[in-house]
Structures are given as structure tokens and as C-alpha cells.
Amino acid sequence: MNTTHWQTLYLNINLATMADGSKSYGAIEQGALAISHGKIAWLGKMQDLPAFDDKLLTIVDGKNQWLTPGLIDCHTHIVYGGNRAHEFELRLQGASYEEIASAGGGIVSTVKATRQASEDSLYQSAFKRLNTLHQQGVTTIEIKSGYGLDTKNEIKMLKVATKLAQALPITIKRTFLGAHALPIEYQHDSNAYIDLVCNEMLPEIAQLQLADAVDVFCEGIGFNLAQTERVFNAAKQHNLAIKVHAEQLSDLGATELAAQYQALSSEHLEYLSLSGVKAMANAGMTAVLLPGAFYFLRESKLPPIDLLRQHKVPMAIATDANPGSSPLHSIQLMLNMACTLFKLTPSEALAGVTCHAAKALGLGQRCGQLKIGYDADLALWDINQPAELCYQFGVNPLTALVKKGKQVI
Ligand code: NIG
Ligand code: FE
């Protein structure tokens, strides 16, 4: 085997390859991994390592630590103005998330703060959140808009998301979520707002190449099925991928609809039905589960995890980091909650923030696994077994982070 193009070689490492969401982490103990031009060029057992010239490459002694793919947070809303601590207090006094939203609080109050914020101040606050996730091993993230709710402010949010990609070595996928909530100026005419989303916002955002996907919050406090379908059609016309916030508070059948439109993913899913699960399986969709929102809203209905398993629907896990339902900017906490609240195995939880998260972003052939030809996005952890990444919380075991072959932490 020709190894002269290898540039970096990690020796004495244990690999959690997460190959194709395999059980038991796809583990290879006492392994090695070689990088060439930002891609994984070889991986396997130390004993199978081909001959190489140590003068031609950088050798890193992994000291028996564990190497995983760089983590992927595939559902966030980290660009926003203000915060909703006051609403948190109201909820503790008995008001529900839906009651607060119906009384003009909730998403709409973040819209007010986001509209008032300058592009620069949104950038500064989002940078801190992004950097926090980065320090925990995140190398790829999805950021949704949806707190602007008019053309100018949705564009402002997506510009901030685009700019963040230059600030840190993180791949950023941007999702246009204009249909997140009804802005006050359209309070009595939701169809007219959907006209604006489909006929003005989406075409302009597509033209400016500010989004990779389109999302809709299909819910009683969001948009109905017919409106959701209109947005999906507009997304399709502009060749943008489709995602949906679905069955979070009730089962409206948005997942079945999304399956008809070959959506990448359906997200939240506490109220997902068996027919929704089957539709996802048939359409090859990924279920994005958000234990932070489940926890923070004190939801008691669990997503149908067993059905998703039985029907082999890949389950991704994400922070849903946002000011209202999940002000939690920790991927490690999500790994823990995926196990403790949703009863995923640690291997399933880790697949949820690596290979399945990549699939939810349409990046399943590029990152999220340790595999030859994949991006060399790697996280090195000072742990004795991969389950520790889910088991403990609050101590950061990350010792190195590599993005496209370059060590960045
Ligand atoms: O994913 N479900 C809708 N959207 C967000 C909540 C946003 C907010 O409350 O600000 C979510 O939970
Ligand atoms: Fe969300």
C-alpha cells in the first residue's frame, strides 16, 4: 500500500468508528488512523498498519485515548436576541409553553428582541454559544433562522449563521425556518404570512444562497398541514432540502407529509404515530430527537423510541439550543439525557450525534463516521470507554479536536 501521501498518523488510539450507526460504537481497540489531504486515508488495528516512512509525516501518540468522529449538533437555533428567563419564571408558576405562546410570549417575544438586535450583536452572542459547543467537540452544526419572521430579519439571521462559518473551524448548515411562528403583523392572516414566506422570503434567500434547507413548525401554535405543504413545495422549487418540526405537542401528521416530499428529517416527535414511523422508514428519513426540549418543557410523553428502532429509522440527537424550549448549549448533556430520559444505549446516543446527525443534514457520505474517504473531523477523548461520554457530565474529557485534518483544539 502506498502510504507516502499520509500527512498525519495517530498511533495507540481506540477508535469509535460509529460506522453506519453500528452497535458497540464500531469499536476498534489498539488502533491507528492516517490522514491525507483532510480526509481519513487509513484506519485499523495497530498490528495491521502498513509500512510508512516516519520522516514524511507527523506522528501523534494517542496514549490509548478514544477517538470519535467530530460531534454534530444537527438541530439548533443559536442565533437569537434577548432571552426568556422571565417566561421560565412564569412557567414555574404554572403557565404552559402553549399558554405563554398564545398570550404573545414565546417565540414571538424572541422575534421582537431579534428584530431589535443589530447583525453584529447577534453575531457576538451566537459566537459564544457556538464556541461553547465547539469546545465540547462539535465540528458540524445546523443553525435555523426563524426569529426574524420578515424578509429583512430572516436574511439578517442567515447572514450571521453564514459569517459564523468563517469564525470557527465548524461546518455550518443553514436552515430557513421562516414558518416558525406567526409574526404580530400577520396575527389574523396566517395564509398571507405563508404567501410571504413562499413568494418573497424563500426566493430571495435562495437567490442569495443563504440556506441549505427549509423547515416548518407544523403544530397548533405553528402552521397547519396545508400551510406546511405550501412551504415544502416552495422549497422543492428552489432545490432546497426539507426538514420539519413535527409532532412535538400533538400529532398532526406532518411527518407523513414530509415523507411524501422526501424530507431529510422530522424533528421532536414525542407524539409521532406508528404510521409516521413507517412513513419515515419508507422514505429513508432520520428522526431527530431533542431530549433538552423534552426535559425543559417537562414533557411526559416519550417519542416512540422502540417503534423507531423496530422500523430501523436512524435516530439523531441534538441540543435544539434556543431561548424558549431548550436553553441548553451542551451536546454532552444531550448524550446523557438521550440515555437517562429516552433510554437510548450509549452507543445509540453517540451515533445520534455522529453518523445519524450527519444523515439528518444530508452529510451522511462525508462526515460523522471514521471511514476511509470521509472528512478527517476527529475528537480525541481522555476516557477509558466510550460510554463515559454519556455517563458523566460537567467534566470535559476532550483533549484534541481535528477539523478536515487540522488540529484546531
Ligand atoms: O424547537 N418548536 C419550535 N421551535 C423551537 C422553540 C423555539 C422557542 O421556543 O423559541 C423548538 O423547540
Ligand atoms: Fe427546534
Image (tube, rainbow, N blue to C red):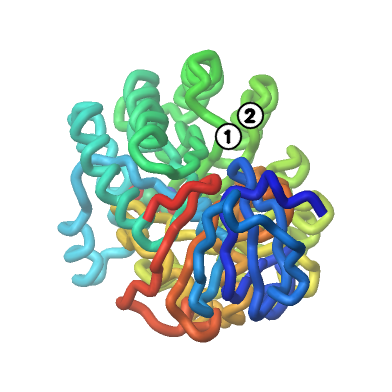
Q: Label 2 amino acid? A: Leu
**As rendered, which of 30 and 350 lies closer to the eye?**
30
In the picture, which quadrant includes the C terminus? bottom left
Q: Label 1 amino acid? A: Ala
In the picture, which quadrant includes the N terminus? bottom right
Residue 195 picture location, percent across and down:
52, 20
Mark 2 crowd level (few <14, some 14–19, many ≥20, 10 Å Cα): many
**Would residue 188 be seen by someone viewing this image from the given angle?**
no
Q: Residue at x 34, y 59 (%)?
A: 135
Q: Which mark is residue 153?
A: none
What residue sits right under mark 1 in the picture?
213
Q: CA distance from mark 2 to mark 1?
A: 5 Å
Residue 264 picture location, percent across and down:
68, 45
Residue 228 picture location, percent across and down:
60, 37
- Contact between labelled residues 1 and 2, with CB atoms less than 8 Å apart: yes
Mark 1 crowd level (few <14, some 14–19, many ≥20, 10 Å Cα): many
Q: Quadrant of residue 143?
A: top left
Looking at the image, residue 9 lies above or below residue 144: below
Q: Is residue 255 left or right of residue 1?
A: left
Looking at the image, residue 6 lies above or below residue 27: above
Q: Is residue 3 left or right of residue 398?
A: right
**Would residue 95 be seen by someone viewing this image from the given angle?**
yes
Q: Residue at x 75, y 41 (%)?
A: 262
Answer with mark 2 or mark 1, whichever residue precedes in sequence.
1
What residue sits right under mark 2 in the picture?
240
